[in-house]
Image: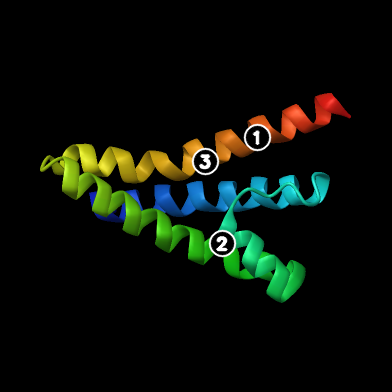
Amino acid sequence: MTNVNEKIIICIFLGSIVDAFTTYILLRISIGEEQNPILRRLLERYGERALIFWPPIETALTCFFAFITAHIFTRNYEILTYIIISIPWIASAYNTAQIVSILIRQ
């Protein structure tokens, strides 16, 4: 049986994979419309190979900034857990909405 921390890590990792996949689809259908400055810089420097680096970078940044934000604004670590888990899933939902919007415009 896995403990709670392993489940949290798995949920964040799966959310980041879904987010990276939707980012990849978004990049394929909307060339030049990428809003993320870090990913834009990586794409300029490394081309499409940057998408290989993106999931671990995104996972690390998501965990870091979610932890800092939750730690600064609240001392409740249960809320911290929910924030950390939800951020990659919210980002993937936002990417999916952008994909649908672009496909409707075309």
Q: Residues within 10 Å of mark 3 (few under 14, many from 20)?
A: some
Image quarter in which the C terminus is found? top right
Look at 68% across and 50% down and name the residue there. Answer: 34
Look at 75% across and 70% down and name the residue there. Answer: 47
Of the two numbered discs 2 and 3 on the same chain, state the one appearing first in sequence: 2
Q: Residues within 10 Å of mark 2 (few under 14, many from 20)?
A: few
Picture quadrant of residue 65: bottom left
Q: Residues within 10 Å of mark 1 (few under 14, many from 20)?
A: some
Q: How far apart, in angstroms, are the residues tagged by discs 2 and 3?
A: 15 Å
**Could you tell whether 78 is left or right of 19 in the image?**
left
Residue extending farthest to the right is: 106
Residue 38 numbered tag: 2
- Name the residue beneath numbered marker 3: 91
Look at 48% across and 36% down and name the residue there. Answer: 90
Q: Secondary structure at mark 2?
A: helix
Dot in front, 2 or 3: 2
Residue 91 appears in the figure = yes
Q: Amino acid at mark 2?
A: Ile
11 or 76: which is nearer to us?
A: 76
Q: Amino acid at mark 1?
A: Thr
Q: Are marks 1 and 3 in contact (CB under 8 Å)?
A: no
Residue 96 numbered tag: 1
Q: Amino acid at mark 3?
A: Ala
Q: Position of residue 82 (x, y in %)?
A: 29, 38
Q: Secondary structure at mark 3?
A: helix
7 or 32: which is nearer to us?
A: 32
Q: Position of residue 44 (x, y in %)?
A: 72, 69
**Could you tell whether 66 is left or right of 76 in the image?**
right
